[in-house]
Amino acid sequence: MASKLLMRVGSIRVPKIAPNPNPLLNATRRLFAHQPISAPPHSPPSSPPDNGRSTHIKSQPTSSLKELELAKFSAIADSWWDSEGPFKPLHVMNPTRLAFLRSTLCRHFRKDPHMARPFEGLKIVDVGCGGGILSEPLARMGATVTGIDALEKNINIAHLHADLDPVTPTIDYCCTTAGTCKFCSCVESLVKEQRMFDAVIALEVIEHVADPAEFCKSLSALTHPGGATVVSTINRSMRSYATAIVAAEYLLHWLPKGTHQWSSFLTPEELVLILQRASINVKEMAGFVYNPLTGRWSLSDDISVNFIAFGTKSGE
């Protein structure tokens, strides 16, 4: 699977949208094929432009974009550990994300993936950790974890929840709110401290930053030469617009309306190029596919909507 995905990424071509057996997506397509997409007047979804990247985001001041993104998450921060609340999609996806991390990191660092604590001895930073729903299982798997976030409210919740488990209080949570780009400043503060990690993980974060290229440079600066960087996000495709925005936010209400802006998504090819320019070479990529019948996510070679990339930093 990895080799096929790397061949697709290496070609730097826009991937074709394959037929999807998912009945939810097909129903969405049928619904919107016969009527214009209209949203509630208080919160319209961002419409995908015709071919090419939208210039809408570029026309906004960087700081205002960041404040908007932070305000969205601040409004729902108290619900991080409510598995039936607004972060339910992340809770449901978490086992699949961890399966990818266990597989790739153990292979790269020559660890036994069948051990109870396969990440023993590894220093990992969870960028955009939120309430700690990824940081905690990483710590239970033996890693020395640092969790950083742009919202102090998130960090406070993460601290409180981590204290409930005798293993997870060791997580080093920190928040940095200085600077115009608050997501980036969290990372940059660690860079200034000359902190470096064996693995740098940023899941579902890059679509919320104003400058993905600068963000990835900061991720690279935190990664030891030869270390690993893992980034997950949503593809900027018509399928992602139908499923991640229209269906997830406006039809099924899995996420609060306005959580995502379609024009802020990156294609796999764009992410690979951005990471390469930051000295991160993508070695493996996989898609996340949701099965509405089982209510579970699984790893797939379908990267047309949700996908995750594993890369290594060039040696110095």
Image (tube, rainbow, N blue to C red):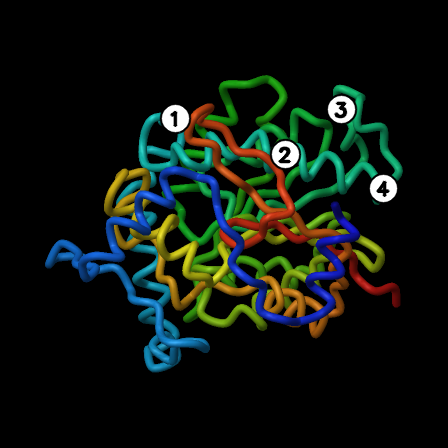
Helix, strand or loop status at disc 4: helix
- Locate the N terminus and report the quarter of the image it occupies: top right
The amino acid marked with disc number 2 is: Leu
> CB under 8 Å between callouts 2 and 1?
no
Q: Is residue 119 above or below residue 68?
A: above
Residue 17 x, y percent position in the rendering: 51, 58
> From the viewer's perspective, is 293 left or right of 146?
left
The amino acid marked with disc number 1 is: Ser
Q: Earlier in the sequence, mark 2 or mark 1?
A: 1
Q: CA distance from mark 3 to mark 2?
A: 13 Å
Check disc 3 and report the residue beneath it: 117
Check disc 1 and report the residue beneath it: 83
Helix, strand or loop status at disc 3: loop
Check disc 2 and report the residue beneath it: 98
Helix, strand or loop status at disc 1: loop
Check disc 4 and report the residue beneath it: 109
Q: CA distance from mark 4 to mark 1?
A: 32 Å
The amino acid marked with disc number 3 is: Arg
Q: In terms of depth relative to the viewer, which is nearer, 133 or 286?
A: 286
Q: Identify the residue shown where x is 50% and y is 50%.
A: 19
